[in-house]
Amino acid sequence: MAESKARTAGPRAAKPKKPESHLGMVRRARRINRALAEQYPYAHPELDFDNPFQLLVATVLSAQTTDLRVNQTTPALFAKYPTPEDMAAAVPEELEEIIRPTGFFRNKAKSLLGLSAALRDDFGGEVPGRLADLVTLPGVGRKTANVVLGNAFGVPGITVDTHFGRLVRRFGWTQEEDPEKVEAAVAAIFPKSEWTMLSHRVVFHGRRVCHSQKPACGACPITALCPSFGAGETDPEKAAKLLKYELAGKPGQRLRPPADFPGEAAARAEADAHDGEVADMAVAG
Ligand code: SF4
């Protein structure tokens, strides 16, 4: 009887939601940023580097691979070629052999040789601290330039990589696909002082929780603020199994993580364990 009543009544129609105002979206976006800051107070660049040149090289190498794979490759690279002058004078085949594990090694070697020669010839062997100069270097686009500016020079920058673009669209901050338009839309929501750390927090969340194929919605700290809740697994127990890195009790990507990082350092030769993320990036990217 109860069943037939339920059938007659049908499911209760959800109350139509009012479309979100721009101001409402901005407030919600800032709440998401605060929640992510609480979740990842230790968010940081996941590439190991000691100076702007190393960060520039590591960022070029990080295209289409994991930061872990780059971190496992760069110690030998920087030991052999510590300065732009050294790298510019490298024998191409020897350079290619060292960076081979990062993939697309011929193109990447060409970029590293070209940018090292440009640093040597046009910038006195120093990495310039201006976007306009950085993007003139071979293999260096706006994304790489912003990573270097934000993390080696303290200049606020928004880094739109595959994780950042996917997440901000899921958050409903913008629907733009073009990275420059995404950057401009997000820049209009947050004060400059937040840009660099916001980028780290969003990318951390994308790598650990909000994956491209299987977002762990049921284990996500911002479900109440995210219009895309339900895009992935909503069962808390099943979702918890999708978490990665320190949230899954595993090592992070850095061989030398900062002192406040709650997980362990990555091992020097376990790159294969993270190939899932590369596949993730390839599909999303
Ligand atoms: S609720 Fe789901 S879609 Fe939204 S941020 Fe969390 S994991 Fe991503």
Image: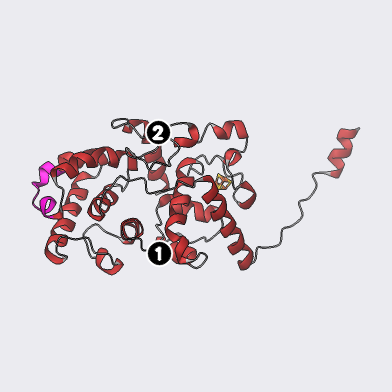
Q: Give the residue displayed 20% in from the left and 54% down from the top.
A: 111
Q: Does 141 appear in magenta? A: no
Task: Give coordinates of residue 136: x percent, y percent.
Answer: 23, 65
Left or right placement of residue 17 versus residue 227 in this view:
right
Task: Give the residue type that dot 1 points to.
Answer: Glu
Secondary structure under the numbered disc 2 in the rendered image: loop
Task: Give coordinates of residue 81: x percent, y percent.
Answer: 14, 47
Q: Give the residue displayed 62% in from the left and 67% down from the top.
A: 23
Task: Name the residue carrying label 1.
Answer: 180
Q: Residues within 10 Å of mark 1 (few under 14, many from 20)?
A: some
Q: Give the residue displayed 39% in from the left and 62% down from the top.
A: 157
Magenta-colored span? 85-95
- Mark 2 or mark 1, which is nearer to you? 2
Instruction: Name the N-terminal-most of marks 2 and 1.
Output: 1
Distance of mark 2 from mark 1, alpha carbons? Answer: 35 Å
Relative vertical location of residue 230 with respect to residue 20 in this rendering, above or below: above
Question: Which quadrant of the view contains residue 2?
Answer: top right
Task: Name the residue carrying label 2.
Answer: 264
Q: Is residue 191 among what the camera can see?
A: yes
| Protein image colouring | secondary structure
Question: Which quadrant of the view contains residue 217?
Answer: top right
Residue situated in front as seen by the camera: 130 or 256: 256
Task: Give the residue type that dot 2 points to.
Answer: Glu
